Each structure stands twice: as C-alpha cells, then as structure tokens.
Amino acid sequence: MPRLNPIRRKPELPPAQSDPARWRPQAFGHKRARAIADPIVEPGWSGVRVLAHAGRNPDGSTYATLSDEQGIDCTAEFADLAEAIAAANLGDEIVVDGWLTVQPTQPGEGVSLPLLETPGQGQLLAQMFGGGRARQAKPSRLLDPARPVAFVAVDLLLVDGSSLIEVPLLERKRLLDSALQVGELIRITPYVRPPIGSLADTWRAVGFREMVYKPANGRYLPAGEPSDWAIALIATR
C-alpha cells in the first residue's frame, strides 16, 4: 500500500529508478562527443527506440512487451517482433534497451550484429551485410512495411529481477551477450573503443551517418532524462 505523505496527504509513488514498469529509454544529452571520457562508440541506428520487457509466466510460457520513449505500449503494433524477443530471451526476466529498425533486413548494405566484444576493424568488415539509413531526429512509426522489422539491442537494464542500471555500461554490454539469442530479427549492436581509425568510413560506406558515444563506466538513467550520451556525425572525406 502506498505510504501517505503526512503533509500533502497524497500517495508517494516509487521513483522511476526503482520501478522497471516506469522505465523509459535513456535520452541523449548535449555534450560534444569529444568531451566523453573513456567512451565506447556504436553506429547510430534509425527507427523506433523501445524498452523490451521479456519474461516467463508461471506456466512456463514466454512473453515480451514493448514501450517507446514516451512510455506508450507498442506491443500490439509490433506483435510478431515481441513474440521473437520473448523466444530469444535466455533469462527468466530481462529489460533491454534497443531499436525497432529495418536496417539489418535491407539486402546489400549495413552491418552484422551478433558481435559484442570489442572488435577489430577486420572483424567488422567481415560481418557487413544489411541496413543503413540516416537516423531520424525523433522516433517514427513509418517503418517500411515491405521489409521485416528487427530488434537491435543496445543495453541490458535488468536480468532475473536484478537491476543493472547502476552497473557500468561496459559490464552491461558484456552481460547483454548472454541475455538474448541472436537471430534474423534479434541483433546486438556492435561497439568499439577508440581509436576508431577507418572504421567510421566503413560504417558510413554501409549507410550509417552518425555514431553514438557513451562513457564506458556510465550508469543508466531510466527516467528518460538527458544524459552524457552524445551523437557525432560521421564526416564525409
């Protein structure tokens, strides 16, 4: 039962940080990418940003729900993909930050996504295969109905009832690899640590126009407030 504030006499709701049902995708901030200390770098995806909550019912059946940056439930809108996420869940309960995007399902362009550990440039070059479109300023439901929508996981926030939002990002990235079974519609974003070298040119060549910089030791802000994540354009040379 909610505890009453003795002054305002109104129920005190638990803070968003303590209630996974109220979590929202962490927002990007306004820092310059070069100001991020000890960053990891990911390609900038386009599509609809969501949190996926997946778990198991008492009878052993699986489920997954999807909520967007505004907290709007979009599970029914992407029912087939929610079913795929539920089947890919390797834990009892997980919450994953990711993108609903057609980029990995575009033939002839893009980047393969099962890679999690810090890769070399040669490894990434060997894994290019599909997808690439400049990321829109705001999430959009206008995904191409002619192409399958995939879920690209970028962060793991909860596993088997234990919150990971206070765990450093790099460790969350490593745990993410064991939380989902990668498949045709379920991917995990690649990431690298500087120096990036010619990898930026490679990402641009396969369709990406932006890179995302995140501090390797950063915690997750699940209330959707601006953070120390930064976006940088991939320069044209």
Image (spheres, grey):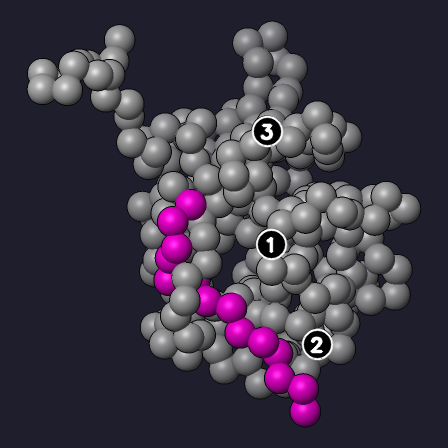
Element on which disc 1 rests: loop
Q: Residue furthest left?
A: 7
Q: Is residue 235 magenta?
A: yes
Residue 171 placed where, x, y %? 41, 53
Q: Is residue 83 visible in this depiction of the protein?
A: no
- Residue in the picture at 56% in, 32% down: 72
The quarter of the picture where residue 4 lies is: top left
Rounded to the nearest angstrom, the CA distance separating label 1 from label 2 is 20 Å
Q: Is residue 226 left or right of residue 91?
A: left
Looking at the image, is 48 positioned above or below residue 82?
below
Rounded to the nearest angstrom, the CA distance separating label 3 from label 2 is 33 Å
Q: Magenta segment range?
A: 224-237
1 or 3: tag closer to the N-terminus: 3
Looking at the image, is 27 positioned above or below residue 77?
below
Q: Is residue 135 magenta?
A: no
Q: Tell me the residue that label 3 is attached to.
A: 73
90, 110: nearer the viewer: 110
Question: Mark 1 or 3, which is nearer the eye?
Answer: 1
- Residue in the picture at 75% in, 64% down: 132
The quarter of the picture where residue 234 lies is: bottom right
- Residue in the picture at 41% in, 67% down: 30
What number is the disc on residue 204?
2
Q: Quadrant of the C terminus?
A: bottom right
Bin the neighbour count of mark 3 within 10 Å (Cα to Cα): few under 14, some 14-19, many 20 and up.
some
Q: Which three-letter amino acid code belongs to the residue tagged 2? A: Arg
Q: Which three-letter amino acid code belongs to the residue tagged 3? A: Asp
What number is the disc on residue 138?
1
